[in-house]
């Protein structure tokens, strides 16, 4: 089943790329078919996944290079299923809002579908060598999407993204080779490498964990390895920013969770350092988001703060912290997708990201008013939104582990609230009216899909918490909590 999920977008990319001479609308319709099919298939996986059954399900493995101990091994737990579903939703949204763009045809849609296939591979791999191959494979379509279709400084942004990610991947590769040497039978299987890693001494685990953490922290990103993010988000096309912030950042957090399962003593030894980095990322991202006039840069810096919440939840090493971190990955993926969707649509119409160039949209663009207000208020983590559930659990875990230091999380959220309310006050409250074409039906459908998911998870979090419950229990058991 997982191989079929990987093949759906891959076949769609090949079909799109091999069909020359069509118009942009025809390519959009072709790309929409595998994107919808992948979403239905991912939803079927989530439906058939049994939270009370084995931790990893839909497992399949074939020898890739038996001599090296690498296998084409696939399997998913609750966290991976949630990430697969998030990837399918956001890819469909990115394709939906691309219909009225001038981003092109064959190249653009082929690269989007190739990117979806590579991300599916990252979340479903059960072999570290396969994980690394898919991890690096995401670089190729993203590089060309930014370099060919981005803004004025697109080449600089694409090169920054490529070098940052590639540099972090070098540390990850070296760490994986040390783990491979320690694994019984010299196998790249995640279970075997976890057994070998846990048998190492604490000092060696710390060194290997540091290498893995650098690779994953670049992608999340964590301060001070965040330098690529603001520039890339500003220059990337709007639909690509949805995938970058909504999914690519979660790849780093997902890798960190797998590293925690592989090297628990290493994580335990650097727990306080990770908590400190999380607090710095929270405050740094929130303050810079508050100071931005560029709305895409504002959302990009807020992503640093929100991924700091994920890092903080993992670093608490408590069940509610793990649950909050994983819930935050899904909640922020949906929320970042909605934020970049509305900001990208505003830029497409006004050709400006500067908040000062906008006036009140009430009376002229009511659909924009609703979704802008909804997105930026949900960014505050208000009750009823998915972010509230995630932040509450991380806050409780931080209070239990670090007491009054949890106040720094509250301070960061207050600063982020100031940034969000500034946008809402400018665009959504009565004032000097601004003429702006309102959202089209397809754009409303894409935004409504994300907004509905955010509300559903905020008001009814039980299905997602049940889905990830087994993974949370296994993570907590690894640290004796």
Image (cartoon, rainbow, N blue to C red):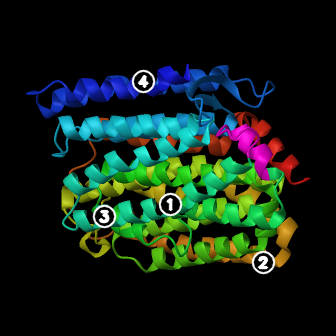
Give me the residue at 56% from left, 68% from top. 222
Is the residue under label 2 in contact with that under label 1 (CB below 8 Å)?
no
Look at the image and say whether residue 93 sits in the magenta stretch: no
Give me the residue at 44% from left, 38% from top. 118
Real-space CA distance between mark 1 and mark 4, rounded to the nearest whole angstrom: 28 Å
**Mark 3 falls on what kind of element?**
helix
Residue designated by label 2: 405
**Mark 4 falls on what kind of element?**
helix
Q: Nearer the viewer, mark 3 or mark 2?
A: 3
Name which of mark 3 and mark 2 comes first in the sequence: 3
Give me the residue at 26% from left, 50% from top. 144
Q: Residues within 10 Å of mark 2 (few under 14, many from 20)?
A: few
Name which of mark 4 and mark 2 comes first in the sequence: 4
Real-space CA distance between mark 4 and mark 2, rounded to the nearest whole angstrom: 47 Å
Name which of mark 3 and mark 1 comes first in the sequence: 3
The numbered mark at residue 170 is 1
Name which of mark 3 and mark 4 comes first in the sequence: 4
Q: Please state the extent of the stretch shown in magenta in the rendering.
A: 183-197
Q: With respect to residue 439, does 147 lie above or below?
A: below
Is the residue under label 4 in contact with that under label 1 (CB below 8 Å)?
no
The numbered mark at residue 159 is 3
Look at the image and say whether residue 195 sits in the magenta stretch: yes
The answer to whether any part of residue 162 appears in the image is: yes
């Amino acid at each position: 089943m997982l191989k079929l999920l990987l093949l759906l977008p891959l076949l769609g990319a090949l079909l799109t790329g091999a069909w020359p001479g069509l118009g942009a609308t025809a390519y959009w319709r072709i790309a929409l078919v595998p994107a919808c099919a992948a979403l239905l298939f991912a939803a079927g996986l989530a439906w058939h996944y049994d939270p009370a059954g084995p931790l990893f399900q839909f497992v399949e493995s074939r020898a890739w290079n038996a001599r090296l101990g690498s296998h084409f091994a696939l399997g998913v737990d609750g966290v991976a299923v949630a990430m697969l579903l998030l990837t399918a939703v956001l890819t469909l949204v990115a394709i939906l809002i691309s219909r009225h763009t001038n981003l092109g045809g064959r190249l653009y849609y082929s690269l989007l579908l190739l990117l979806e296939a590579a991300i599916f591979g990252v979340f479903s791999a059960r072999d570290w060598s396969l994980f690394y191959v898919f991890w690096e494979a995401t670089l190729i379509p993203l590089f060309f999407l930014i370099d060919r279709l981005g803004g004025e400084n697109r080449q600089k942004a694409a090169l920054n993204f490529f070098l940052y990610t590639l540099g972090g991947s070098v540390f990850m590769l070296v760490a994986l080779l040390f783990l491979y040497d320690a694994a019984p039978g010299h196998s790249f299987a995640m279970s075997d490498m976890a057994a070998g890693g846990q048998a190492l001494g604490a000092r060696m685990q710390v060194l290997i964990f540091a290498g893995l953490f650098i690779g994953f922290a670049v992608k999340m990103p964590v301060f001070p390895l965040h330098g690529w993010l603001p520039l890339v988000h500003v220059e990337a096309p709007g639909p690509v920013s949805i995938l970058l912030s909504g999914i690519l950042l979660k790849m780093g957090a997902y890798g960190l969770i797998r590293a925690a399962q592989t090297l628990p003593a290493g994580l335990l030894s650097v727990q306080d350092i990770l908590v400190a980095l999380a607090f710095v990322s929270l405050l740094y991202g929130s303050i810079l988001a508050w100071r931005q006039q560029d709305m895409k840069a504002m959302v990009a810096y807020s992503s640093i703060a929100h991924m700091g919440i994920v890092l903080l939840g993992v670093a608490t090493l408590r069940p509610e912290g793990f649950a909050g971190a994983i819930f935050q990955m899904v909640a922020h993926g949906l929320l970042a997708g909605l934020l970049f969707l509305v900001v990208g649509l505003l830029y497409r119409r006004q050709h400006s990201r500067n908040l000062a160039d906008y006036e009140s949209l009430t009376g002229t663009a009511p659909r924009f008013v609703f979704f802008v207000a909804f997105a930026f208020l949900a960014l505050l983590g208000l009750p009823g939104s998915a972010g509230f559930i995630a932040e509450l659990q991380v806050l409780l875990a931080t209070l239990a582990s670090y007491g009054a230091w949890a106040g720094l999380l509250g301070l960061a959220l207050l600063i982020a609230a100031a940034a969000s309310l500034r946008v809402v006050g400018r665009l959504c409250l009565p004032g000097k009216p601004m003429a702006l074409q309102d959202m089209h039906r397809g754009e409303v459908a894409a935004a409504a899909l994300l907004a509905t998911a955010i509300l559903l998870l905020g008001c009814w979090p039980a299905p997602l918490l049940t889905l990830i419950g087994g993974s949370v229990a296994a993570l907590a058991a690894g640290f004796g909590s």
